[in-house]
Amino acid sequence: MSFGKFEDYNRKYPHLFYPAFRVQEKMRDKFMGLHWWKRKLAKYEEVRKQVQEHDKREEERENRERRQRYEVSKDLMKQGTDFFDVKKKGRRKRRARKVGCE
């Protein structure tokens, strides 16, 4: 079940999941205490935010690099040079050398 479906069911039938939440609360109270769990969940939330920020910065960096590569390829196209054609020509030469050596 997806989280979205879970949320929908919880909204439509709040009494459906109440026993499970009650068991969770009782277990938290018995194991380590409610205070400990509140601190743990607060730390978890902080780390989750840090990970999201890191992912966002990483995505922005990747987008910047992608735009830079695009600009370079556009400049090469304007000059009449296709970067990928240059690589293919280099591969052909190497293959030709191998065939010639055998």
Image (spheres, helix red, strand yellow):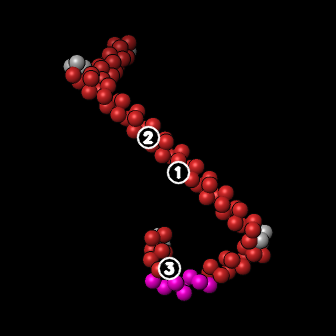
Return the x and y of residue 41 as percentages of the image width and height: 66, 63
Distance of label 1 from label 3 (alpha carbons): 26 Å
Q: Secondary structure at mark 2?
A: helix
Determine contact: label 1, label 3, CB under 8 Å. no
Residue 28: in magenta span: no
Identify whether 61 is placed above or below 90: below
Q: Secondary structure at mark 1?
A: helix
Return the x and y of residue 52 as percentages of the image width and height: 53, 51
Q: Main secondary structure of the magenta part?
A: helix
Identify whether 26 is placed above or below 38: below
Residue 85 occupies quadrant: top left
Magenta stretch in the rendered image: 12-19
Residue 99 occupies quadrant: top left
Distance of label 1 from label 2 (alpha carbons): 12 Å
The residue type indicated by label 2 comes to: Glu
The residue type indicated by label 3 comes to: Asn
The mark that comes first in sequence, 1 or 2, is 1
The mark that comes first in sequence, 1 or 3, is 3
The mark that comes first in sequence, 2 or 3, is 3
Return the x and y of residue 6 as percentages of the image width and height: 49, 75
Image point (27%, 22%), residue name: 76
Return the x and y of residue 24 as percentages of the image width and height: 67, 76
Residue 83 occupies quadrant: top left
| Residue on which the image places disc 3 | 10
| Residue on which the image places disc 2 | 60
Q: Callout 1: 10 Å neighbours few (<14), some, many (20+)?
A: few
| Residue on which the image places disc 1 | 52
Nearer the observer, 19 or 56: 56
Residue 18: in magenta span: yes
Distance of label 2 from label 3 (alpha carbons): 36 Å
Task: Please state the total of marks drawn on the protein image.
Answer: 3
Image point (37%, 35%), residue name: 66
